[in-house]
Image (cartoon, rainbow, N blue to C red):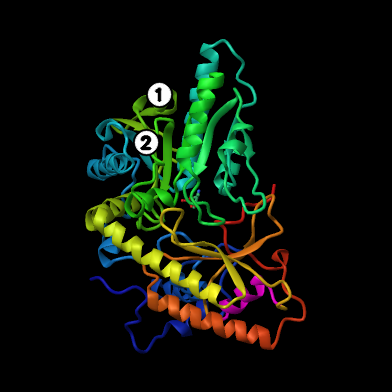
């Protein structure tokens, strides 16, 4: 007989009378013996109350809203290992369909023959894109009888996964720093960093710090010119972690994808604006020739030939299954509508924040130029409180609205950002704005004795703050 987890059925007993809940929870020592599941569940369940409400976490890009159908599909897939393609052929089939649908969405020359894979997220997908670029570069250098030392990769201010890629796989990362009011990589800044050892240029469609899109078309054009002028044919990878699931629906006119022949690979996070639950990303290559075959392992495994290109072996099948569901469920028009609502909420926040007269929006949810985010800076350094104080104050009401300093060379500039996602309704936006006004009034009435600085706050925005080496 099935029962609800953690439900106490014998009224004479109560989980809170159990020694586990009357003592200190095990922290450092492996528990010597087991427990009734209801007691263990109650402890774990109640500890998690302290995590707060994920829907009020306006720092994260990841899906925090779901449908019962998705939870059901996840529950039915919890036992399926995505890597066992021979044993679970239909899960593998759904993954493959998603790859081709994305190739279609991103305008690959031949979606039916496109190659790609699901990953645990954009970070793994970025590593795979970077590795393929490194292998292609090395093969071309070897074929030309040249050395293969000191490869580099050129980018604008990137998400931390590219710093990881560079360090883990021994590639020099040449990041174009921010300067003044320029937050993105420009063609001019890119070109001067490119040379014969550049394995790829990484453009970001939806920079985490500001929300802005880099101009992939202009960057690609500059590389075309470089190829004509100097014979250097440098491929591009687009980190479309957010933008890959936004631009095709909300700004279909932007050329950023496989329409540009120089774009050889793309990564995107299914679990961000792909609206799938946490645990899925995508890496795609323009044509099979762009993915070096040496990187694809054909494992003879449990009676099947298994082509894989992933960093991990076992992975849950559920997030991929749920991704296929979201594609069917929403289609192009559904995604466009969901994202349109998020952009509206982001613009509303930006407008109201600007109307306080205290802040200046850096970016305000324009679908032609970035993701559904509102990012602002403080106008008045003499206000007596900082954006970090405001973030802390909002946190007392449960809102996570991160304040952080920008990466080099604008570490002097602190900004604050609201990420509007599926499920962040206009009503929730208004509730946040009410609390923002209350916080501002409270901070003005009683300013902190000394405004908080970036290094004094625990930063809760892992998306925006790369670890310092
Ligand atoms: C979120 C993000 C990543 C990392 O993606 P995960 O899916 O969290 O691994 C990489 N690049 C950009 C631009 C991002 O926004």
Front-most of residues 173 and 90: 173
Residue 208 x, y percent position in the rendering:
53, 54
| Circle 1 Cα neighbour tier, 10 Å, few/some/many (<14 / 14–19 / ≥20) | few
Any magenta on residue 163? no
Left or right, residue 153 beside residue 82 = right
Residue 354, x across and y down, in percent: 55, 72
Separation of marks 1 and 2 at Cα, in angstroms: 20 Å
Q: Earlier in the sequence, mark 1 or mark 2?
A: 2
Residue at figure coordinates x 61%, y 25% from the top left: 195
Splitting the image into 4 quarters, where does residue 437 fall?
Answer: bottom right
* Element type where label 2 sits in the image: loop
Asked if residue 111 lies left or right of residue 311, the reply is left
Ligand 1 has an atom within 8 Å of the beta carbon of the residue at disc 1: no
Look at the picture and state if 255 lies above or below 351.
above
Please say whether residue 65 is visible from this viewpoint.
no
The relative height of residue 459 versus residue 155 in the rendered view (above or below) is below
Q: Where's residue 193, x and y in %?
A: 63, 32
Quadrant including the N terminus? bottom left
**Residue nearest the observer in this picture, 181 or 464:** 181
| Mark toward the viewer: 1 or 2 | 2
Residue 393 is covered by the magenta coloring: yes
Residue 293 circle label = 1
The residue drawn where x is 33% and y is 48% is 252
Q: Secondary structure at mark 1?
A: helix
Relative height, residue 362 to residue 313 (above, below): below
Residue bearing mark 2 = 258
Looking at this rendering, what residue extends furthest in the top direction?
A: 145
Residue range highlighted in magenta: 385-396
């Amino acid at each position: 007989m099935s029962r609800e987890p953690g439900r106490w059925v014998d009224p004479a007993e109560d989980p809170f009378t159990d020694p586990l809940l009357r003592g200190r929870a095990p922290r450092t020592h492996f528990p010597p013996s087991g427990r009734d599941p209801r007691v263990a569940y109650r402890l774990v369940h109640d500890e998690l109350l302290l995590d707060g409400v994920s829907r009020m976490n306006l720092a994260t890009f990841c899906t925090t809203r779901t449908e019962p159908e998705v939870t059901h599909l996840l529950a039915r897939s919890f036992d399926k290992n995505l890597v066992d393609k021979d044993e679970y052929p239909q899960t593998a089939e759904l993954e493959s369909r998603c790859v081709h649908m994305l190739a279609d969405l991103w305008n690959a020359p031949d979606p039916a023959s496109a190659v790609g894979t699901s990953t645990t997220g954009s970070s793994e997908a970025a590593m795979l894109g970077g590795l393929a670029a490194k292998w292609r570069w090395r093969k071309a250098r070897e074929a030309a009888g040249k050395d293969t030392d000191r490869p580099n990769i050129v980018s604008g201010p990137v998400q931390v996964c590219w710093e990881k890629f560079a360090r883990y796989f021994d590639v020099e990362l040449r990041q174009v720093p921010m300067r003044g009011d320029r937050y993105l990589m420009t063609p001019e800044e890119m070109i001067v960093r490119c040379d014969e050892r550049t394995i790829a240029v990484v453009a970001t469609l939806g920079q985490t710090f500001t929300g802005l899109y880099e101009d992939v078309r202009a960057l690609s054009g500059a590389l075309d010119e470089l190829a004509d002028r100097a014979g250097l044919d440098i491929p591009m990878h687009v980190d479309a972690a957010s933008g890959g699931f936004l631009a095709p629906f909300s700004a279909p006119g932007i050329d950023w994808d496989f329409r540009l022949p120089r774009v050889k690979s793309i990564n995107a996070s299914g679990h961000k604006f792909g609206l799938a639950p946490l645990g899925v990303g995508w890496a795609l290559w323009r044509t099979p020739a762009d993915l070096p075959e040496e990187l694809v392992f054909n494992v003879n495994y449990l009676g099947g030939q298994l082509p894989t290109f992933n960093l991990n072996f076992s992975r849950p099948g559920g997030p991929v299954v749920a991704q296929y569901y979201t594609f069917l469920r929403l289609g192009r028009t559904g995604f466009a509508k969901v994202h349109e609502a998020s952009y509206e909420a982001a613009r509303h926040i930006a407008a109201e924040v600007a109307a306080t007269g205290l802040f200046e929006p850096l970016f305000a949810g324009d679908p032609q130029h970035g993701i559904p985010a509102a990012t602002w800076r403080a106008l008045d350094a003499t206000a007596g409180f900082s954006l970090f104080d405001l973030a802390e104050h909002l946190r007392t009401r449960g809102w996570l609205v991160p304040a952080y300093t920008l990466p080099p060379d604008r570490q002097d500039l602190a900004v604050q950002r609201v990420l509007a996602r599926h499920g962040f309704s206009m009503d929730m936006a208004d509730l946040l704005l009410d609390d923002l006004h209350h916080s501002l009034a409270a901070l003005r009435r009683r300013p902190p004795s000394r405004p908080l600085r970036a290094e004094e706050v625990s930063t809760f925005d892992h998306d925006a703050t790369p670890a310092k080496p």
